[in-house]
Structure formats: C-alpha cells, structure tokens
Amino acid sequence: MNMAHLSRTQTLSRKGNDTKLALIRSGVEIMTTYGYNGANLEHILKNVGVPKGSFYYYFKSKEDFGKAILDYYNIFFINKLDQHLLNQHIPSALDRIHAFYRDAKTNMAKYHFNRGCLVGEFMQNESLLPENYSILLNNILHQWQDKIFACLQIAQQQHEIHPQLDSKKLACFFWLGWEGAVSRAKLTKNAAPLDTFIEQFITLIQSNKNK
Amino acid sequence: MNMAHLSRTQTLSRKGNDTKLALIRSGVEIMTTYGYNGANLEHILKNVGVPKGSFYYYFKSKEDFGKAILDYYNIFFINKLDQHLLNQHIPSALDRIHAFYRDAKTNMAKYHFNRGCLVGEFMQNESLLPENYSILLNNILHQWQDKIFACLQIAQQQHEIHPQLDSKKLACFFWLGWEGAVSRAKLTKNAAPLDTFIEQFITLIQSNKNK
C-alpha cells in the first residue's frame, strides 16, 4: 500500500499500532531475559524511544502490558510448534519434534543463551505475579502440551513409540523437562542441556518400541 | 551443655551463631518462595527481629548472604539425597529415587506448594544474579547429579534399567525434568507435575529392561 493513499487517521492509527507492537517486541526481549519482575519498564521504553506517558496510552499497567506480551509470544510460539509438528515434509513425527528442538536451539544460540522461554520466565516469577497470571500460564502450557500430544499420537500410529505409553502424560513430561532444560541452558550459556534433554527423551520413548 | 557452664564470651558467641543461623533459615524460606531478586532483605530481618545494622555484622552484602544460604541449603539437600539414595533398608535403587520424590512432595505440600527448590529459584534469576553465582549453581547441580548417577548405576547393576542406557546423561536428564516439575508445581499449587514426572521417568527407564 502506498503511503499517499492513507488518510491522516489511517497514518496515525498505523503509527500507533507500530508503536504498540514495538513496545510488545521490546517487552518480549527484556522479559525473556529478566522475567516479569526483573523487567524494567523504563528500559523497555528507552529501547523503543517512547515516553512513559505514551506507554499508558497503549497499556493500562505493567500487568496489562505483560498480558499483551504473553498473548503475542503465545501466537508466535504456537506458529513455531505448528510449523514443525505439522510439517508434512517430515514423515516421522519424532523427527518433527527434533526439528522443533533444533530451531529453538538455534534461536537460543542467536541470543547467546541469554533469553529463555517467556512462559518459563513468568512461571518462575509465580510468587510475585499478578493473581490471574497463573491461570493464563497454565492455559498456554496446556495448548503447547496438546500440540506435542497430537504429535506423539502420530508417532504411536507410526509405531515409533510403544502404543502402551500414555501420550498425554508424556506430553506433560516433555514440557516439564523442556522448560527445565531451557532454564539450565541460560545458566550454562550453551546448548548442552537442550541436547541432553532431547536425546534422552527420544531415546527413552523410542526404545519402548521393542517392549 | 548447661548454660551455667558457659562463659560470657561463649554465651555471646552462641547467641551470635543462633542469630546468623536464624537469618539464613529465614533467607531460605523467603528465597525458595520469591527467588534471589524477589527476596526483600527487610522482610527477612523483620521475620528474625534483627536490625539492618546487625545484619551487616554477619554478612557483607546480599551477595554474601545469598552464598551462605546456598551453602546451607546444599548441605541440607545433599543430606536429604543421601538419606534416601543410600538407604540400605530399601533394596531397589529405583525405589530409593521414588522415596526421595515422596519426601520432596510432602515437603512442598507442607508449604502449600509456595516454596520451590532454592537452586531452581536462583537459576531462574540467572540474568540478575551476582556474576560468580552461576559457577556455584552449576557446581551444586553437578553434586546432585553425581548422587543420582551413582543410584542409577546401582539400578543398572540390579538390572532394573537397561545396561546400555547412559546413566550419566540420564542423571542430567533427571534434574532438568525435576527442576521443571518443581517450578510447575509452584504454578499449579499441587503435586500433579511431580507425580507425572516421576511416574514417566521411572516407567521410561524401567521399560528398557526388555529392550
């Protein structure tokens, strides 16, 4: 669309949306590094070049801002999961999980293992979060679990893992270990925890084939 | 020892040690709930009834205090692990790991799932911790890993798990999932994540017996 075709209102509204999006993106960057409580609002505003007054035009409060960030991150992450776990070009369901891991690992390396998973970071601040956040976080984690669950069900149909394994519990087990591995990778500043996690997870569930 | 036999210096020194220990214990309580950065020093001092000036008699800084807390917690936790993992009254090594889980679960329930693992809490604050803390945390986690590793080696000797499984990597995998499960249990405020973790972990490594 050519700028000349936009009315003044449209231009302002687009500018507003751009600013709001820039604030959310900066929030994701800072909060995946420092968590919700460790994130400094002034730091975020400075990154975007927005005065504090303008911030409150877009968000009622830090709580409101945090929710918008969670929403944005969840959409991004669900897309990422679908991109790999529903990838028809990869026939093996376990290979799809492996492709997700490789992508996440590349992304963590890109930021020198300083940024974790936003949901993991928020979860870890649980005692200090606004009250209704734990429901939001649980809902998001259940959405992610359902994605892995569906993929593990395909793996069972493909006889890659034993039919007697409980895919639903296994999907929950996956995210417990995954979040632990991401948190540990932030500490060690390398991919070793992610590597160990995925290697052991896949080895352990695969070996059940022969049970 | 009868108080009457203590000299004035001994009495004062014992009182000093009691205060120091009370500060450390209160620190463990607050920091397993709120993490290192979320912990309010004044809150801790108020709990113990110690003025700020006295605090600095015992500890140079919050950083110094945090280290003392980590040391104290690590000794407590190593004892806890040994109590279960070296328990000669439980013949099966996997049953010993299960006993550790039951103990930890009871302890989390006692505090209504508001307190997590101190090392996990600190790890999650990684970006905001004093610089040398990550080395301390890694060292502690390696000590814990060695304990589980030794126990898994016994399980292999007992043919409870397949000899081809890599016990060392499995021990690392255990703690990734364990810390993730403790963190998630703080969020859900119930034991379900711990239950799922231990059930799946033991099922998956046991089933390899038949590989």
Image (cartoon, coloured by chain):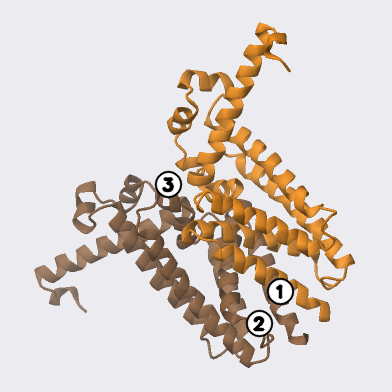
Chain colours: A orange, B brown
* Chain letter of the residue beneath label 3 in the structure image: B
Mark closer to the observer (1, 3): 1
Say which element carries label 3. Answer: helix
Say which element carries label 1. Answer: helix
Residue with the mark numbered 2 = B165
Q: Amino acid at mark 1?
A: Thr
Q: Residue at x 49, y 54 (%)?
A: B124
* Chain letter of the residue beneath label 2 in the structure image: B
Q: Residue at x 65, y 61 (%)?
A: B193
| Quadrant for the N terminus of chain B in the image | bottom left
Horizontal side, residue A155 vs residue A48: left or right: right
Q: Residue A206: x percent and y percent? A: 77, 73
Name which quarter of the figure residue A182 lies in.
bottom right
Say whether marks 1 and 3 touch (CB < 8 Å): no
Q: Residue B167: x percent and y percent? A: 59, 81
Name which quarter of the figure residue A148 lies in.
bottom right
Residue with the mark numbered 3 = B38
Q: Amino acid at mark 2?
A: Leu
